[in-house]
Amino acid sequence: MRYPLFVFLTLAAAFFSGLPVLLAQTANLSLQGVLVQDNGQAAPDSNYQLSFKLWKSATSTAPADLVWSDVFNSVKVVGGKYNVILGSGAPLTAPFNQAYYLGVSIGAGTGPELMPRPRLTAAPAGLALLGSSNEFTSDGPVNIGTTTPAASARLLLNATSKGILIPRMTDAQKKAIAQPDEALLVYQTDQMKGFYYYDGSRWQHITNGVRQVGELYGGGIIFYVDAKGQHGLIAALTNQPLSPWGCSGKVIINARGTARGCGDANTASIVDSCATAGIAARVCDDLVLNGYSDWFLPNKDELNLMYTNLKLAGLGGFSNASYLSSSEVDALQAWGQTFSSGVQGPVQKANSNFVRAIRRF
């Protein structure tokens, strides 16, 4: 009798878990082989002792090149054919990131092996998991943790003690994704934490109906929300043109509200009382931006909320310059705020300053 002339390898599902890998993985490999006699005939039907070894080399017998070995004491051979599961006895643990060669011999492993040693290969479905372009070409559903597919699901994960982990990244890493596909989902770990999806033009924060400061919404970026997260204030995403407050020397007594919620009333009073074109209140009142036309010039407290909640958080793209509010101080001055330091103080109505329109939601 002579040694196996033909060995055909297929890999069990356990082998694919975690591929591609660099760390050692425990695998089960399904092996089918053929035993023939010297005359070319199939070995008699019987049980045989067979030895299997996994090598790093096609020819070396150095102990350093031996990865794994096991002896199967009673392998059933019928018509010359046999089947064994490598790893069902001695655990087959190896980093499957390189080529391995299978040594097969009759007996306890001291006899000569079949040469050349066959190289361990994967079935086509297994090869789909290797490399950078991993593809599953089947159009059937993929089920994990269950054998019962869901009719409407391409991927079904069933578990009661573990979840699915979405890619986690910073805002900068999220924005660095090249040409994100619509509906791409990530979890942001800094600034306004949470799940974000790409809507085809920009990243949107998933809020479940509760709005948050820093969220892109309503044509701009939210800088204030009420206790229920349902209403608040939105700042435009960019500055409006540099503008004067206007009507220097004229008192507009109804434009002196400073508490949050008075900005739109201040703006309306300025526009009604001052016909000068290009003043800050009129620029905001005339603004149509991202489908919205109800913009106004923030008052003193609303301006400070923008600075505190957006500028200090690195949001909103504000300049380190003085911004105008809609709150009048006197006939010659109005309240402004320096966004480099946050200091509020009177500015001359006749001087041009930065302007950022806001709206309610």
Image (cartoon, rainbow, N blue to C red):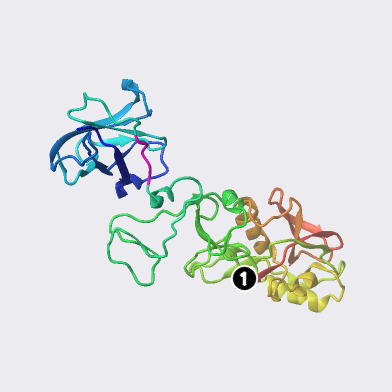
Percent x, y for residue 305?
63, 60
Question: Which residue range is magenta in the image?
Answer: 118-122
Could you tell me residue 333's position as x and y percent?
81, 62
Which of 334/225 is in front?
Answer: 225
The main secondary structure of the magenta stretch is: loop
Q: Is residue 121 found inside the magenta-colored segment of the image? A: yes
Q: At which x and y percent is residue 51? A: 21, 32
* In the displayed structure image, the side of residue 242 where residue 71 appears, left or right: left
Where residue 142 sits, quadrant-wise, is bottom left
Tell which of 66 and 347 is nearer to you: 66
Residue positioned most to the top: 62
Query: Label 1 sits on what residue type?
Result: Gly
Left or right relative to 27: residue 125: right
Identity of the residue drawn at 36% across and 23% down = 60
Residue under the point 62% across and 55% down? 308
Q: Residue at x 87, y 62 (%)?
A: 350
In the picture shown, does residue 84 fall above or below 307?
above
Number of labelled discs?
A: 1
Indicate left or right for 39 with 290 as reference.
left
Q: Is residue 104 magenta?
A: no
Q: Looking at the image, which is closer to me, 161 or 184?
A: 184
**Closest to the observer, 121 or 339:** 121
Mark 1 lies on residue: 218
